[in-house]
Image (spheres, grey):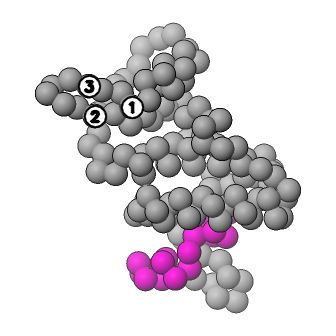
Amino acid sequence: MGDRAVLVWPGSVRGGRLFIGDRVGFDGALSAWPDGAVLVRLEEARDVRRSVLNAYYWSGVIPAVSEATGYTEQEAHQESKARCLSPRLHVARGGSVCWQCARVMDGSTRALSSGEEAQYIERIRVWLAHDFGAIVPDPAKVSA
């Protein structure tokens, strides 16, 4: 995520008007935002649940992996992909797997469907609980 703060939130446009999903949650997240100029960018979201999962992944899951392992957030993301992406799914999409060490090589989460990303996140939760005794916070307790 880098040094720049990013707030990703689902919404919709109907009749030329913008509607924010979970407005109360959005207002809460926005209240923690520093005063100043911002850039508002609208992006077509084909799968809104995927956007919500991705926001949870970066604001709840990856920080928990980073805290448990001592890795930076980018290293935690790489390790999570290597350990927890489905090898069969990755190979089916043209990726490679080290079958000796059971690790996905150069994995990507971008093409995951909502269901696949939810399964990926659940595998990360199990890995952290089993290997580190760490708990990934529930999505309702994480402000994206």
Given residues 110 and 10, the one toward you in this image is: 10
Point 51% across, 10% down: residue: 35
Decide: is 109 above or below 93: above
Give, as a three-letter code, the residue at label 2. Answer: Ser
Q: What residue type is labelled 3?
A: Leu
Counting from the top left corner in percent of width and height, residue 142 is at 62, 36
Q: Where is residue 16 in the image (x, y as percent from the top left)?
A: 15, 25
Looking at the image, the residue that sits furthest to the left is 15
Q: Residue 21 carries which label?
A: 1
Q: Is the magenta stretch mostly helix, strand or loop?
A: helix
Q: Is mark 2 on a helix, strand or loop?
A: strand
Q: How many discs appear?
A: 3
Helix, strand, or loop for circle 3?
strand
Question: Which of the numbered marks, if any, corresponds to residue 54?
Answer: none
Q: What stretch is highlighted in magenta?
A: 78-96
Can residue 140 be spotted in the picture? Answer: yes
Disc 3/disc 1 C-alpha distance (Å): 10 Å
For the residues labelled 1 and 2, say whether their Cβ atoms are less than 8 Å apart.
yes
**Residue 114: in magenta span:** no
Above/below status of 55 relative to 50: above
**Residue 20 relative to residue 139: left or right:** left
Q: Splitting the image into 4 quarters, where does residue 110 fall?
A: bottom left
Residue that mark 2 sits on: 12
Residues at discs 3 and 2 in contact (Cβ within 8 Å)? yes
Q: Is residue 104 above or below residue 74?
A: below
Q: Is residue 94 magenta?
A: yes
Q: Mark 3 points at which residue?
A: 18
Q: In which quarter of the image is residue 125?
A: bottom right
Q: In which quarter of the image is the N terminus?
A: top right
Please, what is the three-letter code of the amino acid marked with disc 1?
Gly
